[in-house]
Image (cartoon, rainbow, N blue to C red):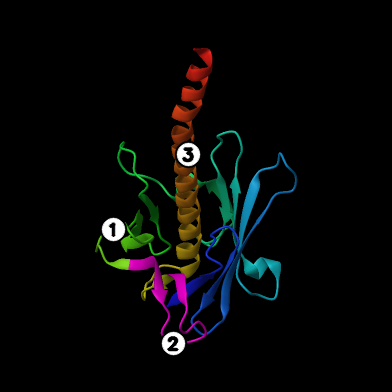
Amino acid sequence: MRLYLVPNDPERTTLVSANGVAHYQVTTTKTHRLAPTVLHIRRPADSEDDSFVADVEWKRFGAHPTVRTSVLDGMMQELQVRQLLYKLGKHFSPTRYFLGNDDEEYKWKPEKGSGHVLTQLKSGQPVARFTQELVKEGFFRGERKWGLQIAPTTLDIDMIVLTFIIMEKRRRDRVAADGMRNQERDEDPVEGGCEGGMGN
């Protein structure tokens, strides 16, 4: 199964299959300037209850983000993102683990030159991969698209999509933050040189 991101933005996108059918929609809202940003994941359905997959609230001022969802065990619950997607060991790593609805443990790990790869921990078998490809058939034929390639699995697709969206948003946030830090470092010597010249 392939689900293409249209557009390629984990905060505002529609996940569309190769035949052009929308399977999930991701939107992001903010009620006012000081309010937390909330990411909504929905699937097409006749009612809001049936369409609901998850809401992720990105807290302000360093507080841990929370997720509200029923994909874990069928019961609506709210928990911190770090409880859903946890890390193993004390070393810093962007790799995160989670327990699937099939009671198997899974791992999302960034792959150099591509996006994230999801594997089942016990078997090591890849379950999903975020990558770019030249689409050879279907609705997007001839276009280069970023999308999720999902292998046959006992893991709920809702859970794959939810955890992927969180992982990809966080990855892009890190890339943006690193870019800003690099830009500031590039500007510092110039500013320092000007100040030094003016002081002489």
- Tell which of 194 and 102 is nearer to you: 194
State the residue in front, 132 or 116: 132
> What is the three-letter code of the residue carrying label 1?
Leu
Tell me residue 81's x, y (percent): 50, 47
Q: Nearer the viewer, mark 1 or mark 3?
A: 3
- Taking the view exactly as shown, the residue that stands out farthest to the top is 200
Q: Are marks 2 and 3 in contact (CB under 8 Å)?
A: no
- Place residue 133 in its image quadrant: bottom left
Work out which residue is located at the far left of the displayed protein and give it: 123
Estimate how packed mark 1 is, as few (under 14), some (14 to 19) or many (20 or more) residues with alpha carbons within 10 Å. Answer: some
Q: Earlier in the sequence, mark 1 or mark 2?
A: 1
Q: Is residue 105 above or below residue 64?
A: below
Mark 1: secondary structure: loop
Residue 129 sits inside the magenta stretch: yes
Q: Which residue is mark 1?
A: 121
Stretch of the chain drawn in magenta: 127-147
Q: Is residue 36 above or below residue 189?
A: below
What secondary structure is marked by label 2? loop
The residue under the point 39% across, 56% down is: 99
CA–CA distance between discs 2 and 3?
41 Å
2 or 3: tag closer to the N-terminus: 2
What is the CA distance from the residue labelled 1 to the residue labelled 3? 38 Å
Residue at image mark 2: 137
Q: Helix, strand or loop at disc 3? A: helix
Mark 1–mark 2 Cα distance, whole angstroms, equals 32 Å
Query: Label 2 amino acid?
Result: Glu
Residue on which the image places disc 3: 183
198 in the magenta segment: no
Q: Nearer the viewer, mark 1 or mark 2?
A: 2
Q: Residue type at mark 3?
A: Gln
